[in-house]
Image: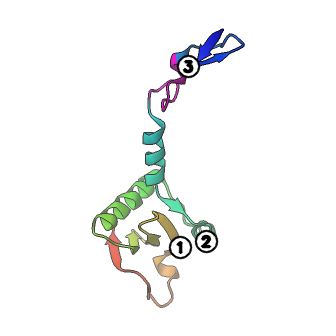
Amino acid sequence: MAEVNGIKVPFVPLVQNEDFAPGKIKGNGSSFDSIFKTELDKIKFSNHATKRLEDRNIELDDVTLNKLQSAVEKAEAKGSKDSLVMLDETAFIVNIPNRTVITALNKNDSKENVYTNIDSVVFA
């Protein structure tokens, strides 16, 4: 009888056992844990923020997302919880521990220019 990961199976496997190494993804040799951590570290957008981006015609490219990611990392390093991140003419309110953008608006769309319930501001 053939074995797959130490378990006897009543069939002949189509792939070799090394393809099923625990914690490895076939092909690139990266571990699931490292890929999972990388994905968790990325900025997320709440449903509210996504809707605001669409309503206000705010487009984000890779360069802007990288700047936003860097700003969140700086705020996190200083112990911030909820931060206003100013990127060019766009303001983002970001929950730092969850790495989630809560809302976004253009500087010109802000009627009173008053932001509450934040503990830091990052100019990126």
Asked if labels 2 and 1 touch by Cβ distance under 8 angstroms, the answer is yes
Kindly identify the residue that appears in the image at 51 percent across and 59 percent down.
Answer: 60
Q: How crowded is mark 3: few (under 14 residues within 10 Å), some or many (20 or more)?
A: few
From the image, tell me which residue sits under label 1. Answer: 103
Query: Can you say which quadrant of the picture contains the N terminus?
Result: top right
Q: What is the chief secondary structure element of the magenta stretch?
A: loop
State left or right for residue 103 relative to residue 120. Answer: right
Q: Position of residue 32 (x, y in %)?
A: 48, 37
From the image, tell me which residue sits under label 2. Answer: 48
Figure check: 98 above or below 20: below
Kindly identify the residue that appears in the image at 62 percent across and 67 percent down.
Answer: 47
Query: Can you say which quadrant of the picture contains the C terminus?
Result: bottom left
Kindly identify the residue that appears in the image at 49 percent across and 75 percent down.
Answer: 106
Residue nearest the viewer, comparing 101 with 7: 7
Q: Which amino acid does label 2 sit on?
A: His
Figure check: 70 above or below 118: above
Q: What residue type is labelled 1?
A: Thr
Label disc, if present, on residue 6 of the rendered structure:
3
Which SS class for mark 3? loop
